[in-house]
Amino acid sequence: MTEKHGKKELVIPGEIIATGDEFLPGDWTLKQGNDIISSRYGVVEKQDRLIKIIPISGVYIPRSGNTVIGEIKDLTNAGWVIDIGGPYQAFLPLRECPGFVEESEMENIYGIGDLILTQVLNVKRTSVDLTMKMRERGFGKIREGSVIRVNPHRVPRVIGKEGSMVSLIKNASNCMITVGQNGLIWIQGNNIDEQIYAEKAIQFIVENITTEGLTEKAEKWLADNKPKITKEKKE
């Protein structure tokens, strides 16, 4: 049964969320006869005629083209085994790194325990291949800043429509923020106060994803909680 939280609808799998031809089925929904049915527990979101579900729990499901942050878990003679938080580990082949990489130099480039920013190249039945060849996106080892983890299904709300929410946090905190679709978020600030401020802002979004008027509430939170050092920098 649909639960109201403010004006947002929380639905369960199998629940009818729309009937008729007014809407088209989007992510985590399916069409059965004249009804659009939810396939996940989550929040209903309508964009023009498209209706979709933003799940609020569950494991990350990799998709080709996703930007992700992963941890190096092992090295083979063909590449790196990487944990991206999905149902199975991913693999970054040597051939998907920019330039030529000698096998003997692999650990110097990415060693076990390193965090890297990369992209999902393709998804197979029980494996995921990654790539580093999109240089313009800043792919590579994460050497500074902090990385936090959120539920991957709450990432769309952290990003916001056309990047509006994450841009709001970036502008308020003076931080560079890179959001991995797998729920790991890389934050780089000028100082620790700005980074913590950005981290807390993201956590505020994550904890309030079902709240109506979240953008306005986030703006107020950012204004009320801006650290002194950031205020002084803006003056």
Image (cartoon, rainbow, N blue to C red):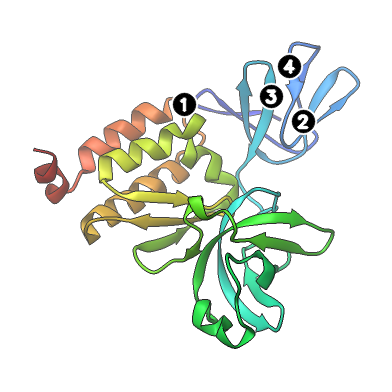
Instruction: Measure the alpha-carbon separation of dots 2 and 1.
Output: 21 Å
Residue 218 occupies which quadrant of the picture?
top left
In x, y percent, where is residue 61? 70, 52
Instruction: Please name whichever residue, 216 or 116, is drawn nearer the observer in this view of the structure.
Output: 116
Q: Tag 2 or tag 4, which sits nearer the N-term?
A: 2
Residue at 27% of width from left, 51% of height from top?
Answer: 197
Instruction: Please name whichever residue, 95 or 209, is drawn nearer the observer in this view of the structure.
Output: 95
Name the residue at the front extreme: 100
In the image, what residue type sits under mark 3? Ile
Label 1 sits on residue: 212
**Residue 15: image tag:** 2
Circle 4 packing at 10 Å, graded few (<14), some (14-19), many (20+), is: some
Whether residue 208 sits left or right of residue 169 in the image: it is right
Label 4 sits on residue: 23
Whether residue 198 sits left or right of residue 36 in the image: it is left
In the image, what residue type sits under mark 4? Phe
Residue at 22% of width from left, 43% of height from top?
Answer: 225
Instruction: Please name whichever residue, 15 or 197, is drawn nearer the observer in this view of the structure.
Output: 197
Q: Secondary structure at mark 1?
A: loop
Q: Tag 1 or tag 2, which sits nearer the N-term?
A: 2
Name the residue at the right extreme: 33
Instruction: Measure the alpha-carbon separation of dots 4 and 1.
Output: 21 Å
Whether residue 23 sits left or right of residue 226 in the image: it is right
Whether residue 41 sits left or right of residue 196 in the image: it is right
